């Protein structure tokens, strides 16, 4: 008898015991993988009181929430994300039967409801509990956190887009039609609405009431169908109803967009972004979420979901959320150049932390073209006592103006404007003053620079940290750990598209994925005897 027949025979025995509803001998049902026992013990240590509170009552013949969490996590550990696939595995896989402990296999709808209705409200508490547990046993250092983001496609049709700019343009055209319509009604019926040629939705509603009063006073009956002629009043009221409906639609779409530029009709929390996975190579935008990972010692310590296409504005919400939920505070924040901004530098410093963020010009500043560009402020000599820059022609640029710049997040930055004292008869003028679209001739233009002293101060301090031996080691670990987590999730675990819709459900799905990843990471570290190791060392060159 070959190995396949032996496995088939064992499976038949378990299947018959399951159908007869006899108590299974769990000691005899030895799982084929040690990660099953590790997962079972891992979930048993959790305090799931918040999860149980989401149930009004748990029936005796119903699978307990703890067992449901076990089988869903084990499914995610093995690349099973669909509720139907997990249900099928509960009937066939011995490891899922071991986790069920003799309970009846749950239905796929039960698994889907558990993921969205019960796990989603308490997902962050469970992730925080897991991270605190890993910190207590020494698997997480709690000193350095590595942050990066990726975009994962939402469970939405890519053709159900709504663009804020297009809606705004159509709304302006609609208001032009409404103004002409109101003027026409004023001539026909002697009805006037609005104030100083400004018309709002409430004015249109008042106009509708007045037109219906005219209809009632003159006892006009509306007609419908072919061969019947509508009165002018009926056509005006129908046109007004159409304008009101369109105006409400545009207003609602702009309200849903908020600060975003787009959203999807089938998942209003998803934003259209440019993805790296572009099969058609045409730069198509797809509905997606920006997933942010904070990794420590190879484990996903925290994560957030956002609608921002870029990573710059995601750092502060991630740090705030992590600080509110975890029992410890990270001292060193290590991130890529996409997170560099004055606002992020200021927040990290005021929060008592150290930033290890690679400057945005770090790589390009090494090139010869960048270093020889005399128009850049980085290549000009700065005099701290006199507060001026010296250009290639040894002429000074003095500070003559200060401006306030407000970002989309509300952060106000102070910009200093430096202007050259005299640019006449300068032989470097053509290469120093850039911008060929200016209407002013080059001979009449003067060199101007706009910079933030606070940002330059933050960047200088951060640059000194990242080029140190500790900074090089942390940047190496950032590329290995946090980018490695995305590689494992997307490539090894095959997760490239969310199954749930809505920000809360997508966050819950991401946390389930992170918990499964952490259990796999812990299991691999135990097997390779690498537990307690937090950072990779730099290679020593001879």
Image: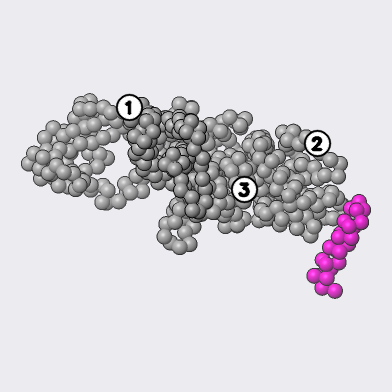
| Residue 123 drawn at (x, y percent) | 65, 39
Q: Quadrant of the N terminus?
A: bottom right
Say which residue label 3 marks.
500
| Residue 33 drawn at (x, y percent) | 75, 55
Residue lying at 75% horizontally and 38% vertically, measured from the top left: 45
Q: Residues within 10 Å of mark 3 (few under 14, many from 20)?
A: some
- Choose between 183 and 67: the one closer to the eye: 183
- Choose between 447 and 104: the one closer to the eye: 104
Please identify the quarter of the rendering in which residue 412 is found.
top left
Say which residue label 1 marks.
196
Residue lying at 75% horizontally and 58% vertically, measured from the top left: 88
The boundaries of the magenta stretch are: 1-25
Mark 3 vs 1: CB contact within 8 A: no
| Residue 115 drawn at (x, y percent) | 69, 45
Mark closer to the chain start, 2 or 3: 2
Visible in this render: residue 150? Answer: no
Is 13 part of what is drawn in magenta?
yes
Alpha carbon separation for disc pair 3 and 1? 48 Å
Mark closer to the chain start, 1 or 2: 2
Residue lying at 26% horizontally and 47% vertically, measured from the top left: 371
In the image, is 443 to the left or to the right of 13? Answer: left
Visible in this render: residue 97? Answer: yes
Please identify the quarter of the rendering in which residue 48 is found.
top right
Q: Please, is residue 252 above or below residue 77 in the view?
A: above
In the image, is 120 to the left or to the right of 44? Answer: left
In the image, is 141 to the left or to the right of 1? Answer: left
Mark closer to the chain start, 3 or 1: 1
Q: Which mark is residue 57?
A: 2
Q: Please, is residue 494 above or below residue 207 in the view?
A: below
């Amino acid at each position: 008898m070959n190995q396949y027949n032996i496995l088939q025979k064992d499976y038949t025995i378990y299947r018959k015991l399951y159908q007869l509803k006899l108590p299974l001998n769990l000691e005899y049902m030895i799982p084929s993988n040690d990660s099953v026992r590790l997962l079972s013990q891992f979930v048993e240590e959790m305090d799931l009181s918040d999860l149980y509170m989401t149930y009004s009552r748990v029936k005796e013949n119903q699978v307990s929430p703890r067992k449901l969490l076990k089988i869903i996590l084990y499914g995610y550990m093995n690349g099973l994300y669909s509720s139907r696939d997990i249900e099928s595995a509960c009937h066939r896989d011995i490891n899922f039967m071991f986790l069920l402990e003799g309970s009846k296999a749950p239905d796929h709808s039960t698994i889907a409801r558990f993921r969205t209705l019960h796990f989603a409200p308490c997902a962050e508490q469970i992730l925080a509990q897991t991270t605190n547990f890993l910190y207590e046993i020494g698997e997480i250092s709690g000193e350095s956190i590595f942050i990066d983001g990726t975009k994962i496609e939402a469970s939405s049709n890519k053709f159900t887009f709504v663009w804020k700019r297009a809606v705004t343009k159509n709304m302006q055209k609609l208001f032009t039609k409404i103004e002409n319509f109101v003027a026409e009604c004023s001539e026909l019926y002697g009805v006037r609405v609005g104030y100083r040629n400004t018309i709002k939705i409430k004015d249109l509603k008042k106009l509708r009431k007045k037109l219906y009063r005219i209809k009632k006073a003159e006892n006009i009956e509306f007609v419908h169908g072919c061969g019947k002629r509508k009165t002018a009043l009926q056509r005006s009221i129908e046109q007004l109803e159409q304008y009101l409906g369109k105006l409400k639609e545009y207003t609602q779409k702009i309200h849903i967009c908020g600060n975003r530029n787009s959203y999807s009709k089938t998942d209003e929390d998803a934003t259209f972004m440019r993805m790296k996975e572009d099969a058609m190579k045409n730069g198509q935008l797809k509905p997606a979420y920006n997933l942010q990972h904070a990794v420590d010692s190879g484990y996903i310590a925290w994560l957030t979901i956002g609608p921002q296409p870029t990573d710059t504005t995601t750092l502060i919400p991630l740090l705030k959320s992590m600080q509110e939920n975890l029992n410890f505070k990270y001292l060193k924040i290590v991130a890529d150049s996409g997170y560099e901004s004055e606002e992020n530098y200021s927040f990290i410093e005021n929060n008592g932390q150290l930033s290890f963020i690679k400057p945005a010009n770090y790589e390009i500043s090494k090139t010869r073209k960048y270093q020889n560009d005399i128009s850049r402020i980085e290549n000009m000599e700065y005099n701290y006592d006199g507060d001026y820059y010296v250009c290639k022609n040894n002429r000074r640029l003095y500070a003559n103006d200060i401006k306030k710049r407000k970002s989309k997040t509300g952060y106000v930055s102070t910009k200093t404007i430096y202007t050259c004292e005299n640019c006449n008869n300068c032989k470097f003028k053509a290469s120093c003053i850039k911008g060929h679209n200016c209407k002013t001739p080059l001979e009449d233009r003067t060199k101007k620079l706009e910079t933030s002293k606070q940002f330059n101060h933050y960047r200088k301090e951060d640059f000194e940290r990242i080029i140190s031996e500790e900074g090089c080691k942390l940047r190496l670990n950032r590329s290995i750990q946090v980018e490695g987590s995305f590689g494992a999730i997307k490539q090894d675990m095959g997760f490239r598209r969310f199954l749930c819709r809505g920000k809360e459900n997508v966050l819950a799905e991401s946390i389930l994925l992170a918990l499964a990843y952490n259990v796999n990471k812990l299991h691999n570290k135990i097997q390779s005897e690498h537990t307690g190791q937090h950072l990779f060392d730099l290679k020593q060159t001879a």
